[in-house]
Image (cartoon, rainbow, N blue to C red):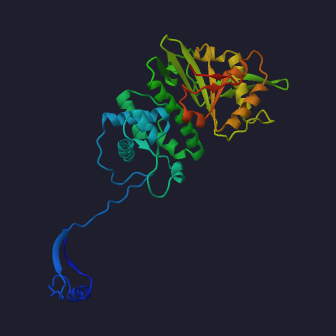
Amino acid sequence: MGLPLLAWLVAPGHGDARQAAAGPGTAVPAAAGRVVEFRYMAIAAVVTPARRPRFRRAAEPPPFRLTDADVEIVRVVARHRLIRSTHIAALVGRSLDRTNDRLMRLFHAGYIDRPRAQLDRFPTSGSAHYIYALADRGVRLLREVDGVEFRNVEWSRKNREAGRPFIEHQIEIVNFRVALERAVRERSDLRIVSAEEMIAASPRPVSRNPFMLRTRLSERGVMREAAVIPDLVFGLELADGSRRNFMVEIDRGTMPVRRSDPDQTSLAGKMRIYLAAHAARQHERQFGWKNFRVLVVTTDRQRVGSMVNALRQLRVPRSAGPSLFQFATSGDLQARDPLTHEWPNGDRRSVALI
């Protein structure tokens, strides 16, 4: 309820003290040459709503009615595993403010999660671009609406267990995916062939890691099994129906380029596996592809140079050689999208994706 308040305006001087001594609501004769004006106002009590928690759901969620646009947001989050709010806004074609409002409501309603491992990335106050993941209620929603089947239904548990390095790596993958999707949207002669579409067309039964490439390598005369799983797989289909297939490696600069021990993971070791699997035509048997290339996105040009030098020293019989790989830095793909960027390959020649 508003509280009545007596306000007075008086020229500075003794009148201020006299009025204060008399108390509010008491008329006090003005001193000579002074004007006193009384105004009565009703001022409503101002109540500041409690701030909702950022990384746990509110005990009293905000009012919410699920819309078709909200379902599309949940689909986008499900497709990308972990995704930043700015990416979601770009993909659904809505303003960031409007998207953030719907994301907040979807989070507190239990359809999506904000993984807690991102907590130390945010200031204690002010706005931040949250990272979202699919929650268990979102899984049930997409099952009901789209008939989607998920191999793992405990997404909320997976989100709680996700550590910061994993989240940051996934966001780098999404940075590439979103840049590619937005670039292809501008082209009427091109479409993205998704990993899901590739899996459906695979001539082999789908395994737990459908894009894992297995091969055999010789180490000091001893054969050993080796495998690599790309961070991302996609195709680009042109207007004439032809297709180009790509596997993507996102490097955050944490893995050594070379190691003396072949049993320890290194970028040179991974490139060697790709070369050997390509030489064995593993992609034809496993995916039905005629060919593919490997795109490597890394931190800086110096690291690109180190990778190219290591690649050119690898000797894999009957392999495609250094030209199988094309390189870019994160900065390159911020300046230009993946389609217009000229990717230097292992032979140090610039090649576009299409």
Viewer-proximal residue, 14 or 66?
A: 14
**Residue sitting at x 17%, y 88%:** 32
User: Which quadrant of the view contains residue 103?
Assistant: top left
**Residue sitting at x 76%, y 34%:** 263
Q: Position of residue 249 (x, y in %)?
A: 62, 31
Q: Position of residue 315 (x, y in %)?
A: 79, 22
Q: Can I make out residue 173 in this image?
A: no
Q: Is residue 226 above or below residue 238?
A: below
Viewer-proximal residue, 165 or 152?
A: 165
In the displayed structure image, the side of residue 144 where residue 183 appears, left or right = right
The quadrant in which the N terminus is found is bottom left
Q: Position of residue 172 (x, y in %)?
A: 56, 38
**Residue sitting at x 67%, y 21%:** 324
Viewer-proximal residue, 307 or 121?
A: 307
Q: Is residue 248 above or below residue 303?
A: above
In the displayed structure image, the side of residue 119 where residue 301 appears, left or right = right
